[in-house]
Image: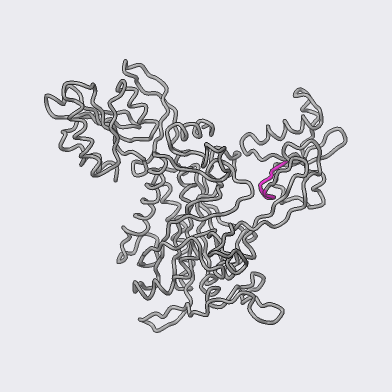
Amino acid sequence: MEMEKLVSLCRRRGFLFQSSEIYGGLNGFWDYGPLGVELKRNIKNAWWQDMVTSHDDLAVLPGAPGSYEMTGLDCAIVMHPQVWKVSGHYDLFHDMMVDCRQKKERYRFDQLRGRWVAAKGQRLLITTLSEENEEAEIERAALKYFKLRAKETAQLEWDGDIVTLDTIAISDLDKVLAPGASEPGTLTEPREFNLMFETYCGAIRDEKSKAFLRPETAQGIFVNFKNVLDSSRVKVPFGIAQIGKSFRNEITPRHFTFRSREFEQMEIEFFCHPDTSRQWYEYWRDRRMQWYMDLGLASGRLRLRDHTPEELSHYSTGTADVEYAFPFMAKGVYGELEGIAHRGDFDLRSHSEGKLDPATRPLTVELGSDGQPIHRGSGKDMTYRDETTGQRYLPHVIEPSAGADRAALAFLCEAYTEDEAPDDQGKMQKRTVLKFHPRLAPIKAAVFPLVKKDGMPEIAREIYRALKRHVTAFYDEKGAVGRRYRRQDEAGTPYCVTVDGQTLADKTVTIRDRDSLQQWRVKIDDVAEQIVEKVNR
């Protein structure tokens, strides 16, 4: 699937628009259109329903070490600055960036990919930002730099596979040809770039009024841990879920909505006893992987990848990523959809005691030269007391953290299909169709009168009104019915209901299935019930 076709469809049919497009757009920010907002809302609703509202607190689910409870929160985007100092974000939440002195461009150090090549007595690392056809892009850049023609590619001596810039020695930066540069050695040495957006609270802009837009939703859950315990009377093990906006000042946002500066997260912080935390980690890791497959992502394009010890965050004793092979990425490269992290007691301890030193094992509070904590915690006791055993302990946390925008993009990529369907004359014609799982489809059913006469529009409108009380529906009477089918196929609508001449005789209508193209007749009074049943299966 060519990504350009999907991007074009998303704009043309109202899934996604560049933010502030009439003013030239703002990189890293996107607006969801009429169909896009329904798709994203359906993804969030499916996640909340499956993880929170329909959860059986009394049952032991398959693979779970025991029964557990679930509840939710909706926390503020702007929080006390001390939250981010104690959590480590203020000091540690950064990416390494480099600048190209020639092109006046800025890049994330670990995103530049290149390959070593030698020609005409010179050895260089030729880099590219493109992950589509990157080998061809690198070869094209090498031919241009060495002033070779396409038929002279044999003069290029390639050394090794494509690597990221952060894997080479800093001393070799003078041998790197930056994207679009005409000479090597134009990149600066990498330096830290904090990803948090700064803002100010109140009328005076100074250090005391400085605050931050949250880079994740998790911290709001941790600082409310005791509030939830005291107000809802939940017992460990239990999870707190939250869906909300987060903000990261990405150096180079790219790949459509995959890497944005404003995005929405669907996160769970699951609190459990330290002795069973490993089992709970494995349970959530496997369950979250299955959720994506149940909603239509092909297992062949999904993978569950455990982090190597070198990748683990300083607080994590285990992390796995659910990853998807997006079409804009190079062959064999996957993009993260969700991370499931075993965070131990890091967060609750930090907010109680103060910022923990990542260099210590086990983690201890980081002290300054005066022997005092660099960033003090709240001093609030975050321990949990088991009423049955009387044991008091600091719960461990398992965090399944998903991106709603990345999930929407993955489901769009997976759904995009080009096949054939009969037109009004019965001839097979190419069509573009989005084969969403019915639960995620922006519009569940469309209602058509075959023609605009003989009372068909009136009957169709009554069916449409009845359907709208249960599912998102669409009414269309413009153009040939085959053309209307194709419009709904592009929107991903799983079912189309057509009122025709036979309806006037026996009060039945035709329902058409988007994927199989099968049609069957149903009594008008049964349409809503059958559509609802099929959508929620």
In the shown orientation, is residue 534 left or right of residue 313? left
Could you say where residue 481 lies in the image, as x and y percent from the top left? 30, 23
Residue 67, quarter of the rendered image: bottom left
109 drawn magenta: yes
In front here: 135 or 22? 22
- Horizontal and vertical percent for residue 143? 77, 30
Q: Is residue 180 left or right of residue 235?
A: right
Q: Position of residue 216 (x, y in %)?
A: 52, 59
Q: Residue furthest front?
A: 203
Residue toward you, 75 or 489: 75
Residue found at the far bottom of this picture: 390
Residue furthest left as drawn? 505
Q: Nearer the viewer, residue 202 or 429?
A: 202
- Residue at the image point whose x is 40% and y is 51% from the top: 44
> Height in image: 274 above or below 40?
below
The image shows residue 470, relative to residue 353, as above or below, that is above
Percent x, y of residue 525 = 15, 37
Q: Quadrant of the C terminus?
A: top left
Q: Residue at horizontal 52%, vertical 41%?
A: 20
Q: How is the image coloured?
A: one colour
Q: Is residue 240 above or below residue 1?
A: below
Q: Nearer the viewer, residue 310 or 373?
A: 373
Drawn side of residue 297 relative to residue 252, left or right: left
In terms of image quadrants, where is residue 82? bottom right
Q: Return the residue found at the far right.
A: 121
Q: What is the number of callouts on the image?
A: 0
Rendered view: 277 above or below 186:
below
| Identity of the residue drawn at 81% across and 38% down | 183
Give the extent of the magenta segment: 108-114
